[in-house]
């Protein structure tokens, strides 16, 4: 199981639950059949835990069209979602109670990833006029429907172009968490 993001959360039993603790819990809790194709990807932030499961692509004849392939993947994702709904809800309830965060699910089949219900969390921002003008330009150009969509678009764009830098930063944060956990316990 891999972890894509790093944060701490508040838990009823401890003040801080590490990313590795949450990831390890999911590693032990998820049914083996759900991780048979590939390990689950667990992404964690302050509000939500997103679990992406890999599902084997349907087998089609070599001469199948791109449309047929896309439809078979859509069918596989839909089928997995419906067949596992009750069990995913049970795991999510347990995790939400344990880690005090919502759990979202997604599936990857081949190169397509589809998220099921997940949070859209409002984020407080204080933007000055030049930043608002950038967002308004994106809205006016129909790149985004609203300032909120434009801001999300900008964040995704920055994330795509800074993956290496963000990965290094997350690694450094994990090391700080590890050192903090190894230090003396505050009284």
Image (cartoon, rainbow, N blue to C red):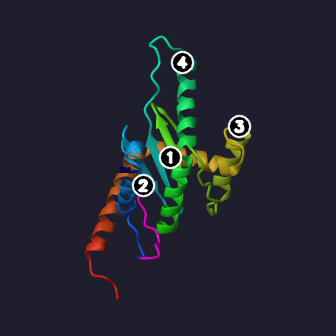
**Residue 57: in magenta span:** no
Which residue bears the numbered disc 3?
Answer: 141
For marks 2 and 4, give the one nearer the viewer. Answer: 4
Considering the whole magenta stretch, tell me its main secondary structure. loop
- Contact between labelled residues 3 and 1, with CB atoms less than 8 Å apart: no
Residue shown at 58% from the left, 36% from the top: 78
For marks 3 and 2, give the one nearer the viewer. Answer: 2
- Contact between labelled residues 2 and 1, with CB atoms less than 8 Å apart: no
Which residue bears the numbered disc 2?
Answer: 5
* Residue 81, position as x, y percentages in the image: 55, 42
* Residue 7, position as x, y percentages in the image: 43, 63
First in sequence, mark 2 or 4: give its number. 2
Tag of residue 114: none
Q: Does dot 4 land on a helix, a strand or a loop?
A: helix
Q: Is residue 184 left or right of residue 128?
A: left
* Distance (Cα) linking label 1 and label 3: 19 Å
Give the answer, above or below, for where 81 lies relative to 67: below
Residue shown at 53% from the left, 45% from the top: 156
Decide: few, some or many residues near mark 1? Use Cα within 10 Å; few <14, some 14-19, many ≥20.
Answer: few
Tag of residue 158: 1
Which residue bears the numbered disc 4?
Answer: 66
> Seen from this angle, which residue lies furthest right?
140
First in sequence, mark 1 or 4: give its number. 4
Magenta residue span: 6-13
For marks 4 and 3, give the one nearer the viewer. Answer: 4
Q: Which of the 4 quarters of the picture holds residue 83?
A: top right
For marks 1 and 4, give the one nearer the viewer. Answer: 4
Residue shown at 32% from the left, 60% from the top: 172
């Amino acid at each position: 199981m891999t972890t894509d993001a790093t944060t701490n959360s508040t838990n009823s039993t401890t003040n801080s639950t590490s990313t590795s603790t949450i990831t390890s819990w999911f590693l032990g809790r998820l049914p083996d059949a759900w991780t048979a194709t590939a390990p689950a990807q667990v992404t964690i932030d302050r509000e939500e835990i997103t679990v992406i499961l890999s599902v084997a692509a349907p087998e089609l004849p070599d001469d199948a069209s791109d449309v047929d392939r896309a439809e078979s993947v859509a069918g596989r994702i839909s089928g997995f979602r419906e067949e596992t709904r009750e069990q995913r809800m049970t795991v999510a309830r347990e995790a939400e109670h344990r880690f005090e965060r919502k759990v979202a699910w997604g599936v990857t089949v081949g190169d397509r990833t589809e998220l099921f219900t997940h949070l859209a969390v409002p984020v407080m921002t204080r933007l000055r006029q030049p930043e608002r003008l950038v967002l308004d330009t994106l809205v006016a150009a129909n790149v985004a429907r609203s300032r909120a969509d434009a801001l999300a678009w900008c964040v995704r764009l920055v994330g795509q172009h800074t993956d290496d830098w963000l990965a290094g930063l997350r690694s450094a944060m994990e090391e700080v968490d590890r050192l903090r956990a190894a230090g003396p316990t505050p009284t």
